[in-house]
Image (cartoon, rainbow, N blue to C red):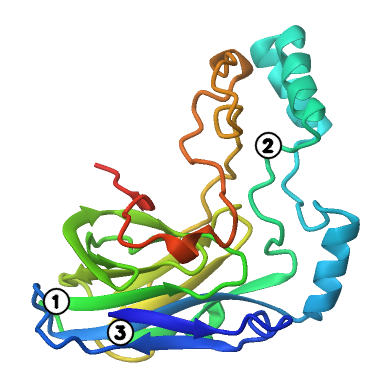
């Protein structure tokens, strides 16, 4: 199976002390593929990790630059009316929380990496047209959740956290901190495809390329619009969320950054878009 190692001492993981571990099975995998690539996602900051931590202890939303503004309030008033807009702010204020609080540390200080390379460095995994390629995704970040897709390709998830699973074909999947997924893709019809992994809070992304040769770079997608938490996400299911204008939110709340350590073979992070 596919696993990874990382330090739990001080801030060593944030400084880059981590890496993949691939353990060859005694028996052949129950699926066929022609080649494989490890895709290790992570986050990096040029700040001292101790300084990042100190800022968060003093102000938990220090790195959240996606917060709602007075302009958003007036837009809500025009759409929902003054009473409902005020009630929404009162609910969040009463919990001393923010509906844009999807990540403690954002792209304001983080650079998101793919196999240690920033998006501009364009990490490239090679393939030949028609091959079945196994991509071993590992989220080795300190606290970032990623939504992963390869525009133009379907991905068939065949393993989760080192264990084989019933194959599921998806357009996109969410990978939490410490989780791993193996997917099979069959690139054909073009010479290069972008592997695009955007952060849950939509403040940055990691990106690389599947290509028939080095030096190719297809179009990198724009970041999706920011998502907003709802009262349902916060466990308040009895509140009229539609009245608050949040019924359209499709993404779940971001759970604890280290919850993925015990995920096992769950496929809860898979997002399928027909």
Of tags 2 and 1, the one toward the viewer is 2
| Mark closer to the chain start, 2 or 1 | 2
CB contact under 8 Å: marks 2 and 1: no
Q: Nearer the viewer, residue 38 or 195?
A: 38
Q: Secondary structure at mark 1?
A: loop
Mark 2–mark 1 Cα distance, whole angstroms, equals 41 Å
- Residue shown at 77%/10% (left/top)? 82
CB contact under 8 Å: marks 3 and 2: no
User: In the rendered view, would you say 251 is above or below 18?
Assistant: above
- Asked if one can make out residue 220 in the rendered structure from this viewpoint, the answer is no
Q: Position of residue 166 (x, y in %)?
A: 16, 58
Q: Quadrant of residue 70?
A: top right
**Label 2: few (<14), some (14–19) or many (≥20) C-alpha neighbours in 10 Å:** some
Q: Secondary structure at mark 3?
A: strand
User: In the rendered view, would you say 253 is above or below 161?
Assistant: above
* Residue furthest to the right: 58
| Mark closer to the chain start, 3 or 1 | 3
Q: Which mark is residue 37?
A: 3
Q: Nearer the viewer, residue 32 or 259?
A: 259
Q: Which mark is residue 232?
A: none
- Residue shown at 65%/15% (left/top)? 79
CB contact under 8 Å: marks 3 and 1: no
Q: Quadrant of residue 165?
A: bottom left
**Label 3: few (<14), some (14–19) or many (≥20) C-alpha neighbours in 10 Å:** some
- 156 left or right of 103? left
Q: Which mark is residue 132?
A: 1
Q: Nearer the viewer, residue 256 or 251?
A: 256
- Image quadrant for the C terminus? top left
Q: Position of residue 263 (x, y in %)?
A: 40, 60
Q: Which mark is residue 99?
A: 2
């Amino acid at each position: 199976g596919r696993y990874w190692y990382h330090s739990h001492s001080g801030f060593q993981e944030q400084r880059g002390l981590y890496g993949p571990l691939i353990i060859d099975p005694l028996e052949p995998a129950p699926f066929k593929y022609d080649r494989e690539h490890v895709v290790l996602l992570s986050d990096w900051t040029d700040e001292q990790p101790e300084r990042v931590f100190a800022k968060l202890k003093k102000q938990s939303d220090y790195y959240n630059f996606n917060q709602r503004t007075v302009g958003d309030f007036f837009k809500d008033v025009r759409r929902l009316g003054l009473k409902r807009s005020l009630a929404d702010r009162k609910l969040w204020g009463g919990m001393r929380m923010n509906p844009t609080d999807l990540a403690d540390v954002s792209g304001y200080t983080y650079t998101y990496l793919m196999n240690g390379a920033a998006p501009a460095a364009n990490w490239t995994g090679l393939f030949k047209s028609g091959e079945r390629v196994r991509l071993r995704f590992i989220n080795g970040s300190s606290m970032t959740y990623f939504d992963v897709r390869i525009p133009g390709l379907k991905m068939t998830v065949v393993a989760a956290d080192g264990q084989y699973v019933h194959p599921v074909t998806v357009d996109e999947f969410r990978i939490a901190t410490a989780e791993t997924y193996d997917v099979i893709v069959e690139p054909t019809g073009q010479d290069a495809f972008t592997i695009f992994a955007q952060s849950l809070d939509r403040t940055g992304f990691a990106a690389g390329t599947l290509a028939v040769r080095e030096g190719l770079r297809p179009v990198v997608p724009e970041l999706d619009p920011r998502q907003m938490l709802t009262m349902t996400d916060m466990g308040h299911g009895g509140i009229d969320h539609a009245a608050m204008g949040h019924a359209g939110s499709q993404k779940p709340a971001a759970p604890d950054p280290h919850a993925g350590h015990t995920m096992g073979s769950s496929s809860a992070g898979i997002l399928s878009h027909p």
